[in-house]
Amino acid sequence: MTQASYYKHHIFFCLNQRDNGQASCAEHGAQEAFEHCKAQVKAAGLSGPGGVRVNKAGCLDRCAGGPVAVVYPEAVWYSFVDKADISEIVESHLKNSKPVERLLVPADVGR
Ligand code: FES
C-alpha cells in the first residue's frame, strides 16, 4: 500500500557552514535563499500539510554544486545563485509541480 506524502513538496536547504576553509553553502547565500523561499511559500499560501514545507538541513554532501536544495518526494536537486532563482523554483516547481530544468544539479556533482 502506498501512502500519500504528508507534504506535496518538501524542500531542504543546506545551510552548512564550515570553519576549516573548505567551501560550504552558507558562504554562498544559502541562509538568504532559505528565508526568501519560506517567505515566498507563505505569501503564495502554499504552506502546510498537503502543501509545501521548507526546512533547513546540514551538509547534503553535494557541496560542489553549492548552494544546493533538494525537493522531495521527487528528489529533484537544485543549485541556485540568487533570489530570482528561488522565486522561480517556488513558482514553477513548488506551486505548479514543474521542475526548473536550468537550475538542476548535474548527476555527477558530489562533494
Ligand atoms: S556544504 Fe552544502 S551540500 Fe555540503
Image: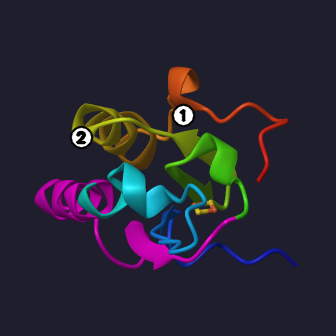
The x, y position of residue 56, in whole percent, is 44, 76
The outermost residue toward the left is 43
Secondary structure beneath dot 2 equals helix
Asked if residue 52 lies in the magenta stretch, the reply is yes
Q: Residue at x 41, y 49 (%)?
A: 94
Q: From what the image shows, is residue 55 above or below residue 65?
A: below
State left or right for residue 107 relative to residue 52.
right
- The numbered disc on residue 19 is none
Marks 1/2 in contact by CB < 8 Å: the verdict is no
Provide the residue designation for mark 2.
83
- The quarter of the picture where the N terminus appears is bottom right
Q: Residue at x 67, y 66 (%)?
A: 60
Q: Amino acid at mark 1?
A: Pro
* Front position in the image: 25 or 104: 25
Q: Which mark is in front, 1 or 2?
A: 2
The x, y position of residue 40, in whole percent, is 19, 54
Figure quadrant of residue 89 = top left
Secondary structure beneath dot 1 equals loop
Q: Residue at x 50, y 29 (%)?
A: 100
Provide the residue designation for mark 1.
99
How far is mark 1 from mark 2, CA to CA? 17 Å
Asked if residue 77 lies in the magenta stretch, the reply is no
State left or right for residue 43 relative to residue 98.
left
The x, y position of residue 61, in whole percent, is 73, 62
Other-residue count near label 2 (Cα within 10 Å), few / some / many at <14 / 14–19 / ≥20: some
* Front position in the image: 103 or 82: 82
Q: From what the image shows, is residue 65 above or below residue 75?
A: above
Q: Amino acid at mark 2?
A: Lys
Which region of the structure is painted magenta?
33-60
The outermost residue toward the top is 102
Quarter of the picture for ligand 1? Answer: bottom right
